[in-house]
Amino acid sequence: MKTGLFISFEGGEGAGKSTQIRLLAARLTKAGRKVVVTREPGGSPGAEAVRHVLLSGAAEPFGVGMEVILFAAARNDHVEEIIRPALAEGKIVLCDRFMDSSRVYQGAAGGLDPAFVATVERVAVDGTIPDLTLIFDLDALEGLERVAARSPEKALAGTPDRFEKDDIAVHEARRKAFLKIAEAEPVRCRIIAADGAPETVAEAVWQAVSPLLGEKVHG
Ligand code: TYD
């Protein structure tokens, strides 16, 4: 049976995940690998429909429990429709955020009981766990400054999305929570220092990914 490679990219706002996913996808494609780039919340038509509800803040009044279940509903659809079929075809899946974002944003830093988040996670991923999770670590303030610089019109209009708008203490709590996951699961997770130049960060990403290529990817 062919088995692909599943890599998730995690971290706070403005940590540079998207740039690094783009660079890694290009490098892998050049090396002849079949790559699928995807993101959460979203990535499949069903999950993209739920994305809008979450990021617009429409679900916020109903509480963080409602939000985590919506993230999970989106995640389950994404896993079934996109991720698992791609892995079965031996492809490398690069996913911008996955289950650790729920553990951090809704769990550790969002106040939900971790046991509840874990139960929902099990249903959502149904056994499809990343082979490697890259946790992009950056000072929270620097991340928010990068977000503002990348979309000045948003900053000026004062309309950050549902999760960007939280205050700095919450962003810092998220950073700590991601680092704690990395510490608890050192085989699956690698911390990537995200404060360097894009080429430097890309090299760190490659160091983490390349050892897995020979081992896991066939076809
Ligand atoms: P997005 O615009 O995709 O931003 P980013 O570039 O930061 O990934 O927004 C996704 C937002 O949703 C982000 O603020 C993190 C949040 N999120 C959760 O709170 N829980 C989750 O399970 C996921 C996947 C994302």
Image: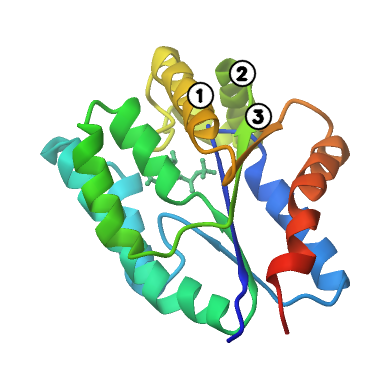
Residue 1: assigned label: none
Residue with the mark numbered 1? 175
**Label 1 CB less than 8 angstroms from ligand 1:** no
Give whichever of 11, 217 is nearer the camera: 217
Q: Is residue 103 left or right of residue 96?
A: left
Give the answer, above or below, for where 179 lies relative to 161: above
Given this view, does label 2 or label 1 mark the residue nearer the observer? Answer: 1
Quadrant of res 80: bottom left
The image position of residue 218, as x and y in percent, is 71, 79
Question: Is residue 59 at least partly visible in the picture?
Answer: no
Secondary structure under tag 2 reads loop
Residue with the mark numbered 2? 139
Quick check: marks 1 and 3 in contact, CB under 8 Å? no
Residue 149: assigned label: 3
Question: Which quarter of the frame holds ligand 1?
Answer: top left
The image position of residue 125, as x and y in percent, is 36, 61
Q: Earlier in the sequence, mark 2 or mark 1?
A: 2
**Crowd rating for badge 1 (residues with CA inside 10 Å; few <14, some 14–19, many 20+):** many
Given this view, does label 3 or label 2 mark the residue nearer the observer? Answer: 2
Q: Earlier in the sequence, mark 1 or mark 3?
A: 3
**Crowd rating for badge 2 (residues with CA inside 10 Å; few <14, some 14–19, many 20+):** some
Q: Is residue 148 left or right of residue 24?
A: left
Residue found at x 70% / y 73%: 217
Quick check: marks 2 and 1 in contact, CB under 8 Å? yes
Give whichever of 7, 201 is nearer the camera: 7
Q: Is residue 139 left or right of residue 129?
A: right
